[in-house]
């Protein structure tokens, strides 16, 4: 379920849906909303799904907002570790 917490800050909380469903929801939000800076809570996802969602959606966000930023709220340092080689310059990871 896509839950937008604040209209101003563009914070999204994802449920443990299929990875493709979560990717589609975030990409649709990026496409339709003004969200140069956004926060996405992926703490409910397992490590592999969190890595996939953050990598693909960060890329989509970068294509629309090259100077934008996504703050990813994660539940494991492993997500940050596994995605570090991707050099996602528009992403920052925070442990919840």
Image: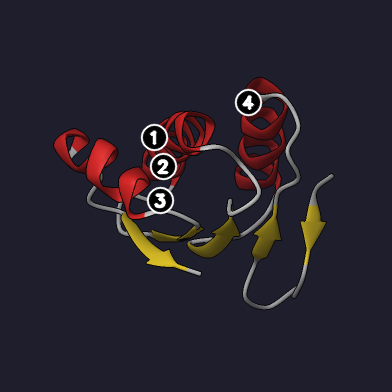
Q: Residue at x 59, y 54 (%)?
A: 43
Between marks 3 and 4, how big is the CA–CA gap? 23 Å
Residue 55 disc label: 1
3 and 2 marks in contact (CB < 8 Å): no
Identify the residue at image location x=48%, y=57%: 74
Left or right: where 35 falls relative to 85: right
Q: Earlier in the sequence, mark 1 or mark 4?
A: 4
Indicate which label's residue lies in the foreground, 4 or 2. 4
Which mark lies nearer to you, 3 or 2?
Answer: 2
31 is higher (above) or lower (below) than 43? above
Quadrant where the N terminus lies?
Answer: top right
Do the residues bearing badges 1 and 2 touch, measured as CB atoms within 8 Å?
yes
Q: Earlier in the sequence, mark 3 or mark 4?
A: 4
Q: Is residue 89 toward the left or the right of residue 1 in the image? A: left
* Residue located beneath label 4 in the image: 19
Q: Earlier in the sequence, mark 3 or mark 1?
A: 1
Q: Mark 1 or mark 2: which is in front?
A: 1
- Dot 3 or dot 2, earlier in sequence: 2
Drawn side of residue 25 relative to residue 89, left or right = right
Who comes first in sequence, dot 4 or dot 2? 4
**Residue at 32 percent of width and 45 percent of height:** 78
Q: Which residue is mark 2?
A: 58
Secondary structure, mark 2, is helix
Relative vertical location of residue 29 with respect to residue 22 in this rendering, above or below? below
Q: Position of residue 85 (x, y in %)?
A: 15, 35
Question: In the rendered image, which quarter is residue 71 located in?
Answer: bottom left
In percent of width and height, residue 68 lies at 38, 59
How far is disc 4 from disc 2 in space, using C-alphas? 14 Å
Check whether the beta carbons of the residues at disc 4 and disc 2 lie within 8 A of each other: no
């Amino acid at each position: 379920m896509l839950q937008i917490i604040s209209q101003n800050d563009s914070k999204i909380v994802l449920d443990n849906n299929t990875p493709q469903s979560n990717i589609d929801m975030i990409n649709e939000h990026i496409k339709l909303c003004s969200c140069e800076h956004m926060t996405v809570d992926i703490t409910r996802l397992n490590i592999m799904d969190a890595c996939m969602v953050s990598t693909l959606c960060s890329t989509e966000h970068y294509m629309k907002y090259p100077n934008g930023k996504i703050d990813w709220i994660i539940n494991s340092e492993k997500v940050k570790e596994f995605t570090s080689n991707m050099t996602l310059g528009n992403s920052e990871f925070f442990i919840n």
